[in-house]
Image (cartoon, rainbow, N blue to C red):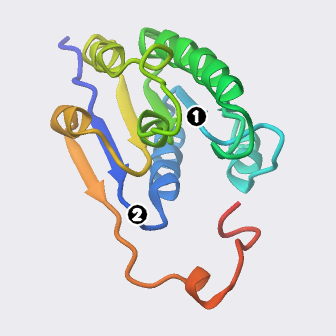
Amino acid sequence: MAVKRGLFLMYTGDGKGKTTASLGVTLRAIGRGLNVRYMQFIKSPERTYGEKIALKKLGVEMEQMGIGFTWTKTPEEHREALQIAWAKAKAALADESIDLLVLDELNNALAITKFPIDDVLPLAEVIEAIQNRPAGMHLVITGRSAKQQLIDLADLVSTIEATKHYYEEGIPAVKGLEF
């Protein structure tokens, strides 16, 4: 029997809904009995997110490997968190037991320019790990400012644009909608 080819889906752009799209794919995969691993690069385990609560109820552990926005901690703290997160993600990309791997906000992490990241999250290493992942592993990567090299590798790229957002009216993040 031939091994099914794993697909690489990317959700990027400045609009709301990239993580939400990855969660939709995750729900379908869970429903079909696939082994799912969900990892978040920027979000911190110090905050509570509705998606983490829901996935836990469905038997999927969401690993939040970030420490928050880049302005909330020192560059050294962020660099250390990115290095640890990338080591975990790289190991997951080689794990043959995973049917669907979601690397939420990896694009955001790769787009950091406030401090150097190339030595702790090397784009060439990310590309190599994606290309060498197990043949049947599906991969979802989300986040703004996707690197062109990753767009070129992806089988599907959806760019989510903001046409209108209630933030513009001064409405802050809403529990159950944003977190």
Question: How many marks overall?
Answer: 2
Comparing 38 with 124, the one in front is 124
> Residue 80 appears at what percent x and percent y?
66, 18
Comparing 174 with 138, the one in front is: 174
Q: Position of residue 29 (x, y in %)?
A: 47, 40
Q: Which mark is residue 41?
A: 1
Check if mark 2's residue and mark 1's residue have beta carbons within 8 Å. Answer: no
- For mark 2, what is the residue? 14
Q: Nearer the viewer, residue 127 or 94?
A: 127
- Secondary structure category for the residue under label 1: loop
Q: Could you tell me which residue is drawn at 76 percent across and 44 percent down?
A: 57
Residue type (three-letter) at the residue carrying disc 1: Phe
Q: Position of residue 73 (x, y in %)?
A: 74, 37
Per the image, label 2 sits on a secondary structure element best described as loop
Please indicate whether residue 12 sits to the left or right of residue 74 in the image.
left
Q: Pick the quarter of the image with the C terminus.
A: bottom right
